[in-house]
Amino acid sequence: MNHQDTAAALLPLLGGAGNVRTVGHCMTRLRVEVADRSAVRGAELRALPGVLGVVEDGESWQIVLGPGTVARVAPELERLATAESPAESLAERGATLRERQRARNATPGKLFLRRLAQIFVPLIPALVGCGVIAGATGLLANLHWLPALVPALSAIASGFMSLIAVFVGYRTAKEFGGTPVLGGAVAAVIVYPGVSHVAVFGRQLAPGQGGVLGALGAALLGTVVEKACRRVVPEALDVLVTPSLTVLLPGLVTLYGLMFVAGEVSAAIGRCAEWLLANGGAVAGFALGGLFLPLVMLGLHQALIPIHTTLIAERGSTVLLPLLAMAGAGQVGAALAVYVRLARDVSVRRVIRSALPAALLGIGEPLIYGVSLPLGRPFATACVGGAFGGAFVGLCHQLGYSVGATAIGPSGWALFPLLAGNHGLGRAVVVYGLGLLVGYGVGFGVTYLFGVRGPGPALSPFPGGSAPGPPLLKRRRG
């Protein structure tokens, strides 16, 4: 089934064009907000070919389609939904109800995490692309190859990161109901080189000080000012007064307060991460590696993106991402153990074969929804494998061999080009590679011994030994 056919099949199962309010996607999941959740045919949606898993959260549905596929299906689904209701766009249909229903069907914490994801998830492709180029540039520089090309590649890789505050400001204003370009304009002051001539509390500001946290705060403040101006400024003056005040007032607050405060917070996040791993490396790694799979299952892992981005801006790399990547290694090991133990279960083994390549590259949802969650215990044993892999990487950091990622992207083998370490790329690769092996080995061993009762089709989690499709997961509200 191609992506047009997939989108056409999804639309009626989601209740039709009139029921679809917004369509978005991350690296693996199609995120659809609907007006009436009872109109969604969940069982048929789950069984649709190509659908790897479904997560429901109130009026929001996350449909796991896998990397590559989701980026092609999402615009096609939005086009079909809009074409069937040309009088108004998807965004317009949901504008009056979206925030009220979100607030009613989610706790403040969930709402905040969801909004963070909506701000940062669209930036991930650029972060991945620039990160890979940066990794290749560093490798060429270390090997003294193509010296004339290295500066050009460095400029290409660094351009986006130097202006990421602008993109964050744009996305923040859009998510919170402001004018996106005004949000970007307010946040742009953070990266303007001329801020180095501004002194705050007796200290000169530095371009980029405060990073993405400052951009978030500046754009949020700009949105508040803009909405207030729309309420009180006469329509005849609105086109001049509102944009000017929206940029001026938050801009001054950003320069004379927010950049300093956000810069201190960003530095504190970096110091905290370093202290945590330096003093409790193995314990911290065990906890982070063991708890990450449940976050992925619930779709909450995207909330960590601002922390990764802040660490990259402050320290040049995020030491947390290689630790969290160990969760995927535990999942791979667990899946391999299931493959060996259920030697006669053709359906489960077929799912594992199809999902394993993506899992090796850090895309774990196909294995989560197609294998470990339906079977139950392999999900827990996969977490154990991730915990031990994380403990190994954390212990190495505690012993002085730290490894980080210079950009946010997929994990697993796909993270190798993005690695950096305090003892050079070679040792960083060794530490990370050994951590993956520990995750694979422990995940396999624990699952083989405790995760599956025994071989044979009678042990399949599906009636008759055939898998009807990944499970429909429904999160409790509140």
Image: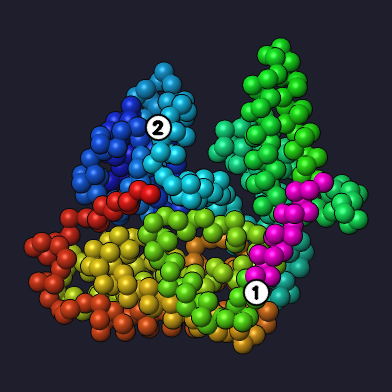
Q: Quarter of the image holding residue 210?
A: bottom right
Give the Cα distance between marks 2 and 1.
43 Å
Coordinates of residue 283 in the picture (x, y in percent): 51, 80
Determine if residue 277 is in view: yes
Look at mark 1 in the image and give the residue it sits on.
274
- Front residue of 470/264: it is 264
Which of the 4 image quarters holds residue 305?
bottom right
Q: Is residue 346 left or right of residue 40?
A: left
Residue at (17, 55) in percent of width and height: 468
N-terminal-most mark, 2 or 1:
2
Q: Amino acid at mark 2?
A: Arg
Task: Look at mark 2 in the image and give the residue it sits on.
Answer: 21
Q: Is residue 114 above or below residue 285?
A: above
What range is drawn magenta here?
256-272
Secondary structure state at the residue bearing disc 2: strand
Q: Is residue 86 above or below residue 220?
A: above
